[in-house]
Image (cartoon, rainbow, N blue to C red):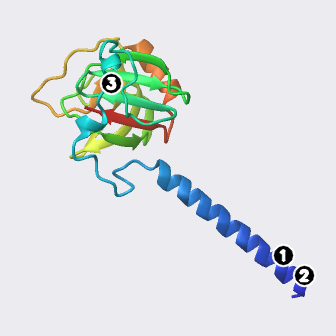
Amino acid sequence: MSRSSSGFVAGLTAAALAAVGFLAYQASASAPDHLAGKKPDANPSASASRSPKDKADPKAVPAQSGTGERVIYSVGEDRVWLVKASGKAQRTYKVTPSTVDPVPGTYAVTSRSGAVPGSDGVPIEHVVRFTSVDGIAIGFSSAVDGSTPKPDPSKKTGGIRQSRENGNAMWEFATISAKVVVVP
């Protein structure tokens, strides 16, 4: 091998290593806390509190819910915000919670399904899953018939139900790896 070709190969190797390092850094920076080895805040309500101004407007994006484009789900308010990269809510709406709540923290959309039977037997569409708790998949979905009944408290379900209109908006917004922030 000539000296110029070995220098070329060394340069390509260095560039490849730099690219892999950069991609690894990006992946670790955007990984959900539970995958990155981070634990949720000891006092999640403190990090997800609203400023006094925000309490007057329940539609205001929760303070300290992260930055950038993200889905925010408040287990206490049963509300979702679809937040643009600018930090402004593109849409917010009430949801019907499942019987199993996700732990407050930051996650990423892990899977999506166009149409499947729900864990309660109801046909659902636009399923956007982002975590699981004790083997129960947690995610947003819409009943095909448009209903949003309260789930049977005797069953462990993870489907956070939303209207079909809101489900369509979630489906368009929350693609694989999209950030989902759960607040109290």
**Which residue, given by chain and number where applicable, does mark 3 sit on?**
51
Which residue occupies 62% across, 63% down? 20
Q: How far apart are the alpha carbons under marks 2 and 1? A: 6 Å
Residue at disc 1, secondary structure: helix
Q: How far apart are the alpha carbons under marks 1 and 3? A: 56 Å
Determine whether 152 is above or below 156 in the image: above
Q: Quadrant of the C terminus?
A: top left
In this rendering, position of residue 140 left or right of residue 30 = left
Q: Position of residue 101 (x, y in %)?
A: 22, 34
Amino acid of disc 3 = Ser
- Closer to the camera, 62 or 176? 62
Q: In which image quadrant can residue 86 be found? A: top right
Q: Does any portion of residue 102 appear in the rendered image?
A: no
Q: Position of residue 37 (x, y in %)?
A: 34, 58
- Closer to the camera, 173 or 47? 47
Determine whether 13 is above or below 80 in the image: below
Amino acid of disc 2 = Ser
Residue at disc 2, secondary structure: helix
**Which residue, given by chain and number where applicable, does mark 2 sit on?**
4
Q: Does any portion of residue 170 appear in the rendered image?
A: yes
**Which residue, given by chain and number where applicable, does mark 1 sit on?**
8
Disc 2 residue crowd, few under 14, some 14–19, many 20+, Cα 10 Å = few
Determine whether 22 is above or below 56 in the image: below
Disc 3 residue crowd, few under 14, some 14–19, many 20+, Cα 10 Å = few
Which residue occupies 87% across, 80% down? 5
Q: Residue furthest left?
A: 154
Residue at disc 3, secondary structure: loop
Q: Earlier in the sequence, mark 3 or mark 2?
A: 2
Determine whether 163 is above or below 19 in the image: above
Q: Position of residue 99 (x, y in %)?
A: 18, 29
Report if the CB atoms under discs 2 and 1 are less than 8 Å apart.
yes
